[in-house]
Structures are given as structure tokens and as C-alpha cells.
Amino acid sequence: YSHSVSQETVAAESKNAVSPSVKKKQQKFPFAKNIFLGKFDSDILTYPEVLDKERLQTLNEMVAPIERFFSDGDFDSKKIDATGHIPQETLDQLKSFGLFGQQIPEEYGGLGLNATEYARLGEVTSIDGSIAVTLAAHQAIGLKGILIAGNEEQKRRYLPRLATGEWIAAFCLTEAGSGSDAASIQTRAQLSDDKNTWILNGSKIWISNGGIANLFTVFAKTEITGHIGEKQDVVTAFLVERNFGGVTSGKAEDKLGIRGSNTCEVRFRFLTIIPAENILGEVGDGFKVAMNILNIATKCLHYGNCDFPYESGVLKKLIGWTAEHAINRQQFGKPLAEFELIQEKFAKITCLTYAMESMAYLTAGMLDTYENPDCAVEAAIVKVFSSEGCWYGVSECLQILGGMGYMKDYPYERILRDSRVTMIFEGTNEILRIFIALMGIQYAGIELKEVTKKMRNPLMNPNFFFYTIWQKRRQVNDSPTLNLGLDGYLHPSLQGSAKLLEYCVLRLQYGVETVLLHHGKAVIDQQMMLKRLADVAIDIYAMTAVLGRASRSYCIGLQNS
């Protein structure tokens, strides 16, 4: 096999993989938000399959040379980690595979992959955390603003070069004083007197690809005049080329993990002159653009290039390596694999990996199957569950190896270091738990507004109050009536699990109603309560994905899939 012929092969096969046009189904109500109301879309239990047999075969043919590249002896993750950078020849090979343009439409020179295909490629590139992050920072956030908010001229100017990897993209939002608070940025852009250019001044920290990028999506404060003549600061998004001048990158950060990825400070001085046509969207749209990018990035990172495939892809590799060790390693006269405590570890790690993979491909399937799906909460759920599951799984694999796992001669300690950042990237898990709960409660609160209002005024609504109390008596006793009928949508062998899933959905509904009744709008300050609700929603989504996938596997005869 020769890597030198892979570019044409992969390009041709990728065209075949994504060319067929699949008509999407009508938009659905948001699944994860609806479970906060006790509503469950049973269609999800069918576990959508996006790719037909022919497309799946073509995708696998496209993936094969990439897998061979990463398993080749010439590819050295240990060296990337030790030197703190990805060799240029490795980057060139990634470019030849088209990996810098996975979700850029074909008309702009990209592969135009859908979410499911993107996830599959992400599993392959996940074997090295530094490469996974470099690719994700480029396309999941770096260039994503052009795709979702750029005009046609901006797309045609930048996307072809970004698709080939000739140019690398970076996303510049974080500042020293504004970690999770995007509205508090201090970088400013001032409109020139002739109104043809903007003058940028400020700095951004911890920018992935910051030292190697040619194009930056930068968020800065701009001044506008309000309706009554007052001056207001708003956030605006700009496309800034490095060759505009005044753009400098600081020293690459020396990180705990993903050491080969480039992370540094990026400074923009008054010499950075931006043409007016390089605004993304309109003046003042910056916060909306940033949030849209990050919402999509959460999805991309968890079924695309970084977190989900990094997590499930790496864990599947580690399970294989660790199982081989446990079979061959003799202790007390028998293989490690025969000890129950070791078997328990493998069982837990394998179950977690199956759940992570099921959740991510279910979410990808929703995005590929339905028109304009609202999957922001699902994406956040996958991120939290998968990042924490990965941290646990890698740690347990290292534990099975014992002292050997702690040594740099083996990949375990590197993968453990690499995986830690997944609980911080693109919104810490703490922020995302609050997001999951508040988005669900806000959605439920719209429908429950009148109910809550009447229940908080029993003297004015005595009949309604006592009727509702009577209806909820079984919930109060932790024995809700299981009336969703979910067992009718799953394989008969999963009936008990279906009942448990239904119980959890109804208990979440009761918890949401109780929280709204007791706290109202002040629920935003009840972080421990929000965390518990988020954890329930996360577990419900995991159960749904696992049961749907397992049921489908049973029904089509794949009992061990």
C-alpha cells in the first residue's frame, strides 16, 4: 500500500459516498426538551439508520486508507506528544485525505459529509488527540461561522482554500477575563472615518490552531448608535486574515495533554485593518453567531472529530489492547482476564463505550434524518456523558495494566492526559449541565405556565388545585402510572428496561413541575437542583439510545452488535 496514491482514491470515493441526495423528513419537536414534559417520541426508539448498504460500503472504502495511515508504523503519536507539534508531512497527508474539508459542501471543494459520515471519520482520526483537536478546531469552530453566517462571496473566497487545508482556520473568542462569559470580551473594532474598514485591537487566549492559522473568526466589541442617539456596545464577528497585518501569535502553550495541537495567544493590534465586507452577518450579530457556532460545535465535537469519536474510538482501541494484555498476563497462576474484578472493569468500560457510541450516532441520525432538528440539548448531553465516560474508561484501562500503564512506554498515560480536556472544551461540563437543565425547564415552562400559576394560588383555584393533587398522588408516592407504552416499540426481550425508561421519564416530568412550582424563575440560581435534573435527562437519553440500538440489532438479527 502506498499513501501517495490516497488523495485521488479518497477524493473519488468520498464523492460517491456523499453524492446521493436523501430527502429529509418533516421537522420534529425536540426530543430531549420534550422529556422534561414527560413526552416521549417513540419514533426515536427505531434508531434511525441514515446510510443504506451501498453508501455504507462506499464510506468504509473511503475510510480504509485513512485507517491504514494511522495504523502504519510511520505514524508516531508518542513523537507528536513528546515534540509538541504535528510534523508537516503528517499534516500534508491529512490534507490529501480531504480531512480539512469534511463538512464543507462539494461545490466549495469539500467532501460534503453528513453528520453520520463525519462521525465515522472522526472515530478513525481519534486515535491521536492532537490531530483530532487540530481538525476539529479548524472545521467545527474555525470555519463554521462562514458556513452558517457567511454570504456567498465570503464562502467562495475562503472555503475552497480551507477545504484543501491550504489555509487553516481558528476561532477567537476567549479572553483573559471572559472564559465562559462571552459577553464580557474587551477586544474592540473601530469603524474607520470612510466606513470602509474596521481597525481591530485586542488579544485572545488559548486559541486552538492560533499559531498555524491563516484565517481567524474574531469576536470584538463595536459601537453603535441606539434608537434615541445613545452609544451602545455590541459584539460583532469578523473574518480576519493573518496577512491583514498586526496579527501576531504568542508562544505555543505547554499543555497537560493534546500537546501536539497548537494553542496560543493571538494578538491584534491597531495595525489590523479589516475590510467592511469581512463582517460575518451584521454589526451586532456576533453573540448570536458565536452561540450558533458553539452549539453546532458541540454536535460536531461529539459525533465528529474531537470528543465523541475521540472518546468511543479511543476506548474501543484501548479495550482491545487491554484485553490482549489481560489474556496474556499471568498472575497467581492464571490470566488476569479470569479474575472477577478485572471482568467487572471490562464490563463497565464496554457498556459505557456502547452507550457513548449509541448516543452519538443517534444524535447524528436525527440531524441527518429530519429538517432543521433542534438537537442542542442532545449534543450537550452526549458531550457530558462521553467526556466523563472516557475519563473513567481510560483510567480503568490504565488500572488493569497496573504499573505498566503508568509508564510512557505505553500509550495509556498519554491518552489519559489527552482525554482530560474533553470535560473542559466547548463549554465545561458544569456549564453544560446548567444549560441542559435550563433549556429543558424553559421549554417545559412555556407549556406549564398556567398550571404553575394556578397551583401557586390555591385559594383562587381550589378545584384545579385539589384535582391536580389527586392526579399526582402516585407521583408523590414514587409510583407513577406507566402510560407511555414504550414497551410496544422495543424487542420483547427489552420489556423490563422499557418500563424502567418510562418510569425515569415520568419522574423527570414530576421533578420539573415541582421545581417550577417551588422556585419559579429563581430556579436559575438552584444549581444543585439543576445538576440533578440534568443528570436524570442525560441518563434517560443514554437509556433511549442504548435500548433503541439494541432493539434494532435484535430485530434485524445482529444479536452481538
Image: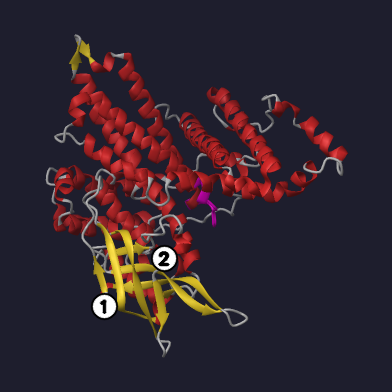
Residue matched to label 1: 245
Crowd around label 1: few <14 · some 14–19 · many ≥20 (10 Å): some
Residue at image location 21% in from the left, 11% down from the top: 334
Task: Examine the rendering and report whether any part of residue 520 can be seen.
Answer: yes
Residue 259 picture location, percent across and down: 22, 49
Residue 245 higher or lower than 354, as above or below: below
Is residue 55 something that shows in the picture? no
Pick whichever, 335 or 232, lies toward us: 232
- Looking at the image, residue 269 sits to the left or right of residue 559; the answer is left
The residue lying at 60 percent from left, 26 percent from top is 499
Q: Quadrant of the C terminus?
A: top left
Between residue 6 and residue 220, name the one nearer to us.
220
Q: Quadrant of residue 326?
A: top left
Q: Residues within 10 Å of mark 2 (few under 14, many from 20)?
A: many
Q: Position of residue 180 (x, y in %)?
A: 44, 55
User: Hey, which quadrant is residue 342 in on the image?
Assistant: top left
What's the CA distance linking mark 2 and mark 1? 22 Å
Say which amino acid is labelled 1: Gly
SS for callout 1: loop
Q: Nearer the viewer, residue 24 or 364?
A: 364
Task: Quickly name the residue at label 2.
Answer: 145
Which residue in the rendered view is the most extreme toward the bottom?
A: 194
Q: Is residue 430 left or right of residue 94?
A: right
Q: Give the extent of the magenta segment.
A: 368-378
Please provide percent x and percent y for residue 491: 54, 28
Location of residue 39 with respect to 474 vertically, above or below: below
Judge left or right: residue 52 versus residue 111. Answer: right
Rendered residue at 20%/57% (across/down): 91
Going by the numbered disc 2, the residue's amino acid type is: Gly
Please count the marks in the image: 2
